[in-house]
Image (tube, rainbow, N blue to C red):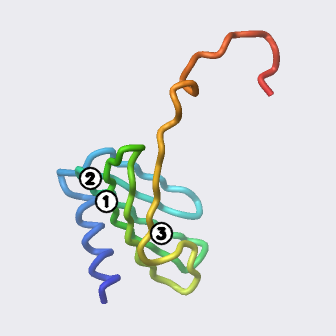
Amino acid sequence: MFATFLFALVERLLRCDWRRDYLEHNGPYEDARSARIGWLRLEVNHCFVLDHADAAIGLRLPSRDGYRELVYRVCRGEEQIRDAGFHHTHFRPLPPEQYARRPQSNDIPF
């Protein structure tokens, strides 16, 4: 019952006027939609090939060394692609030397 509520909530928030950075992917195997509302990140995925659908609502918080993302995901269907429940991810920005421009040459870069 909570999964049904969360699916309906995320679907409704994805259609509201407050959303930003809306992305939609309609592929032959899966439809995916995502957006953000302030610090909230919303995502819904529907897989056609497998019996799977999931919805996620997450909170992205800045920290001293990047940002942290706390996500709660619910899944429906028989074949689970993604894990349901709480997930935590810590993203760190690239060091400044990664942004430095490399010298141009005619060599192959690999």
The secondary element bearing badge 2 is classed as: loop
Total numbered labels: 3
The circle on residue 59 is: 1
Q: Considering only vertical position in the picture, is 20 above or below 96?
A: below
In which quadrant is the C terminus drawn?
Answer: top right
> Comparing marks 1 and 3, which lies closer to the viewer?
1
Query: What amino acid is labelled 2 in the image?
Result: Trp
Q: Earlier in the sequence, mark 2 or mark 1?
A: 2
Q: What residue is rendered at 27% in x and 46% in y?
A: 20
The circle on residue 46 is: 3
Q: Earlier in the sequence, mark 3 or mark 2?
A: 2
Residue in front for this viewpoint, 88 or 106: 88
Distance between mark 2 and mark 1 Cα atoms: 6 Å
Q: Is residue 15 left or right of residue 106?
A: left
The circle on residue 23 is: none
Evaluate if marks 2 and 1 touch, with contact meaning CB atoms under 8 Å apart: yes
Distance between mark 3 and mark 2 Cα atoms: 24 Å
Query: What amino acid is labelled 3 in the image?
Result: His
The secondary element bearing badge 3 is classed as: strand
Q: What residue is rendered at 33% in x and 44% in y?
A: 21
Report the residue marked by disc 2: 39
Q: x, y percentage for residue 43? A: 38, 61
> Comparing marks 3 and 2, which lies closer to the viewer?
2
Q: x, y percentage for residue 106? A: 79, 10
Picture quadrant of residue 16: bottom left
Q: What residue is rendered at 38% in x and 71% in y?
A: 72
In which quadrant is the N terminus drawn?
Answer: bottom left
Residue situated furthest front in the rendering? 64
